[in-house]
Amino acid sequence: RNALRGRASGLNLALRATASELVVLTDATRLVPGGGWLDEPVAGLLGEPRIGAVVERGRGGGSGWTWLAPRRLLQQLGGFDEGQDPAGLEDADLERQLAAAGHRVVDWVALGPAPVPTERHGVGDVAPRRQSEARFAQRWPDAPLPREWARVAEEI
């Protein structure tokens, strides 16, 4: 998180700060489980060239997420949309970018029985809903809002 500019900006700073082949980016509301939690997702990502990211989203009623992806691919696409800051649909936007570039985004649990990050309730922030929706609709006019966004927006 980059408190001065927002979550998408902080994620992009993380992408630039690492030299690793793969990156794991996780929302501040997530708790990662113990050992072995990356084994299945990494094997799936490395085993299928068309997979651009493995994503876990808001299980247990939360709105957080965790991404596993090749750092260079995310950088080639320009990273997360900082226009979504302070926080919003930056993950859904990047997912659309990956699809437009011919890559698939796979759900974390679809790759096997690996433990998934869980929600840490009471932590995090909620984006200005209308600002995020407008930015996403402008960039992706034919795309519906992600289901989990609609569910979380109803809770606000």
Image: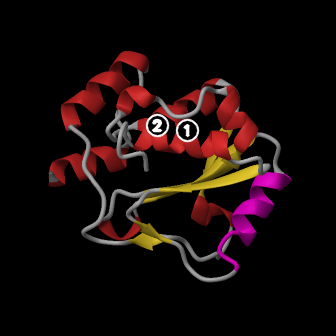
Q: Is residue 113 magenta?
A: no
Residue at the disc numbered 1: 12
Task: Give the Cα distance between marks 1 and 2.
Answer: 5 Å
Q: Helix or strand or loop: what does disc 2 sit on? A: helix
In screen coordinates, is 52 left or right of 151? Answer: right
In screen coordinates, is 119 left or right of 134? Answer: right
Q: What is the x, y in percent for residue 127?
A: 26, 42
Residue shown at 54% from the left, 37% from the top:
95
Residue shown at 74% from the left, 71% from the top:
39
**Circle number at residue 9:** 2
In screen coordinates, is 23 left or right of 29? Answer: right
Q: Is residue 61 above or below residue 137?
A: below
Q: Which residues are magenta?
A: 36-47
Q: What is the x, y in percent for residue 54?
A: 63, 53
Q: Is residue 37 magenta?
A: yes
Q: Determine contact: label 1, label 2, CB under 8 Å.
A: yes
Q: Helix or strand or loop: what does disc 1 sit on? A: helix
